[in-house]
């Protein structure tokens, strides 16, 4: 009997200890694994904003032709009867979405937004932003210089060539004017440098239940070449440059548009 116990006790105790250690180790690994998952979920405080662009030839979403006619009954005289827009390009940069106390950079680098004149929706950009209630958007319509353009990719540099021709420009609109049935091509170049600050209504809320939201930048050309009375402004007349540039500035609106239909969401 003494021989039996001497042989069995040294063998059985280490096995029991090993089994107990294995159970404890498994419990620790399970606990740590769950803890990591909980921490990951708790720290996941970022969502996503996408931006789309859309062109409208009026002051609201529309598929009407991109032609402006002289208004009847307007007392001001105009040397042109109508004009048609065939191409429109804007230099945009430094897009920020702002909460009440902070801001989140959406896109810093400059890019050329060439409007699709058929009013088809255009995908612009996507960025991750912290959870929050975004009440404002800021962006620059801004000229770019040659040094800034040199830091961009070759494809992007090509897009900016026309904006660096002779002078620096932020907006280029091309088209044709018509006078007594005779057409003449025009290219209007704006030197506009402005920071746009727009309220978001409804606000954009990024949180766990709603981690992805879309905003649409709508650019409406209905008033680009109109005076305050509705008279046509000749884009080839340099005295109209400031008025047209101001019209271009106020023609840009941004709003929440999750279904990407070009209309502001109700909430």
Image (cartoon, rainbow, N blue to C red):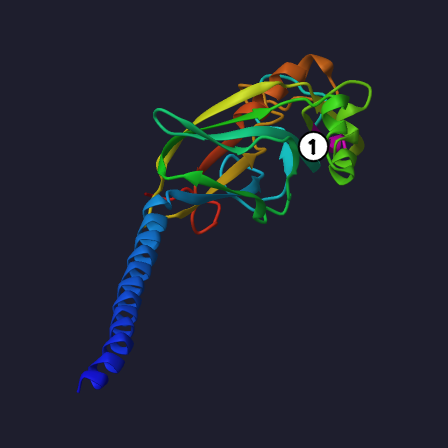
- Image quadrant occupied by the N terminus: bottom left
Q: Is residue 224 visible?
A: yes
> Residue farthest to the left?
1
- In the image, 13 versus 8, the foreground residue is 8
- Residue 57 relative to residue 128: left or right: right
The image shows residue 77, relative to residue 255, as above or below, that is above
Secondary structure under the numbered disc 1 in the rendered image: strand
Q: Give the range drawn in magenta.
A: 172-180
Task: Give residue 170's quadrant in the image.
Answer: top right
- Image quadrant occupied by the C terminus: top left
- Residue 69 relative to residue 203: left or right: right
The image shows residue 76, relative to residue 68, as above or below, that is above
**Magenta segment includes 174:** yes
Q: How far from the left and from the top, in percent, is residue 63?
A: 57, 47
Task: Give residue 6's quadrant in the image.
Answer: bottom left
- Residue 31 relative to residue 85: left or right: left
Q: How far from the left and from the top, in percent, is residue 62?
A: 53, 44
Q: How far from the left and from the top, in percent, is residue 231?
A: 60, 22
> Residue farthest to the front?
2
Task: Give residue 78's quadrant in the image.
Answer: top right
Q: At 31% from the left edge and 62% from the top edge, which residue is drawn? A: 25
The image shows residue 53, relative to residue 187, as above or below, that is below
Write down the residue under mark 1.
83
> Residue farthest to the top?
239
Q: Is residue 74 visible?
A: no
Q: At 75% from the left edge and 26% from the top edge, which residue is drawn? A: 163
């Amino acid at each position: 009997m003494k021989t039996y116990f001497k042989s069995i006790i040294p063998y059985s105790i280490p096995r029991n200890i090993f089994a107990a250690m294995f159970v404890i180790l498994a419990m620790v690994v399970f606990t740590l694994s769950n803890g990591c998952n909980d921490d990951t979920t708790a720290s996941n405080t970022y969502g996503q904003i996408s931006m789309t662009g859309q062109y409208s030839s009026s002051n609201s979403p529309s598929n009407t032709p991109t032609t402006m006619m002289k208004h009847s009954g307007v007392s001001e005289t105009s040397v042109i009867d109508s004009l048609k827009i065939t191409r429109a390009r804007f230099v945009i940069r430094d897009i920020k979405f702002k909460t009440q106390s902070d801001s989140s950079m959406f896109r810093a680098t400059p890019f050329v937004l060439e409007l699709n004149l058929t009013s088809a929706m255009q995908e612009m950009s996507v960025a991750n932003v912290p959870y929050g209630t975004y009440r404002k958007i800021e962006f620059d319509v801004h000229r770019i210089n040659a040094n800034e353009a040199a830091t961009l990719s070759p494809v992007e540099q090509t897009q900016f060539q026309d904006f660096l021709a002779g002078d620096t420009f932020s907006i280029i609109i091309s088209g044709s004017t018509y006078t007594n049935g005779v057409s003449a091509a025009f290219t209007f170049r704006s030197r506009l440098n402005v920071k746009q600050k727009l309220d978001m209504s409804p606000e954009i809320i990024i949180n766990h239940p709603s981690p992805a939201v879309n905003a649409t930048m709508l650019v409406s050309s209905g008033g680009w070449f109109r005076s305050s009375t509705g008279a046509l402004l000749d884009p080839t007349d340099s005295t109209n440059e400031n008025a047209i540039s101001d019209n271009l500035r106020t023609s840009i609106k941004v709003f929440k548009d999750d279904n990407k239909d070009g209309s502001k969401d109700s909430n």
